[in-house]
Amino acid sequence: GLDYHWPEPAREIQQAVFIDMVKLAVELDVPIIIHDREAHGDTLDILRQYGKGIRGVFHCYSGSLEMTAELLRMGFYFGFDGPLTYPNSKRARRVAENLPLDRILIETDSPYLTPQAHRGQRNEPAYVRYVAEELAALRKISVEEAARITTENGRRLFHI
């Protein structure tokens, strides 16, 4: 993916590598996991140009509802992790509330992006339950149902 938060590697290098990865995923017909940080426009442009028929997930999704609508049309899934539990994560919550349930995944992003309950500590896979709890509360379903749905979604996306 693309991460414009840091100055290195240069954007042109990131874009060239991302294009190669998108082309490879299309060629091999495998899902792609996309990291998109402060690079929404370029990420979408590359997918529009090189990603015909691609499937995958936007890891730690942070896009707008408008971007979400376009990515849904392209067939993408959306991964949520610790930031969904942050009090100021209004955009992520709004997206998670409005997405079709069959397009949502939950992630750890360990060792980063620790859920609010353990903020300041090293993240670990066991903390993904806090993301499931937040998703369940937002969607007004049980935690067990959120876990079942997101597990099924992962199996469908990765063909497992």
Image (tube, rainbow, N blue to C red):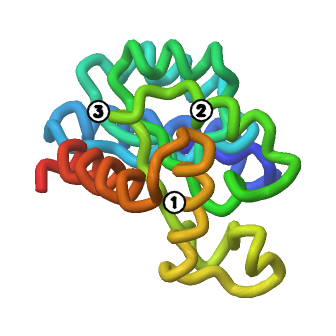
Which amino acid, mark 1?
Answer: Ala
- Mark 3 vs mark 2: in front: 2
Which comes before the other along the chain, label 3 or label 2? 3
Is label 2 in a helix, a strand or a loop?
helix
Q: Nearer the viewer, residue 4 or 98?
A: 98
Residue visible at 64% across and 80% down? 123
Q: Position of residue 117 (x, y in %)?
A: 75, 75
Question: Dot 2: few (<14), some (14–19), or many (≥20) neighbours within 10 Å?
Answer: some
In the rendered view, tell whether residue 19 sits above or below residue 146.
above
Is label 3 in a helix, a strand or a loop?
loop
Q: CA distance from mark 2 to mark 1?
A: 13 Å
Which amino acid, mark 2?
Answer: Glu
Residue marked by disc 3: 55
Residue visible at 80% across and 38% down? 90
Residue marked by disc 2: 97
Q: Nearer the viewer, residue 152 or 108?
A: 152
Residue visible at 56% across and 36% down? 15
Residue marked by disc 1: 132
In the rendered view, tell whether residue 109 sits above or below residue 7.
below
Q: CA distance from mark 3 to mark 2?
A: 22 Å
Residue 44 position by quadrant: top right
Q: Position of residue 51 (x, y in %)?
A: 35, 23
Which comes before the other along the chain, label 3 or label 1? 3
Residue 5 placement, left or right of 146: right
Kindly give the residue lying farthest to the bottom in the view shown.
121
Which quarter shows the C terminus?
bottom left
Which amino acid, mark 3?
Answer: Arg
Asked whether the residues under the numbered discs 3 and 1 touch, taking CB atoms below 8 Å apart as contact, a structural biologist would say no
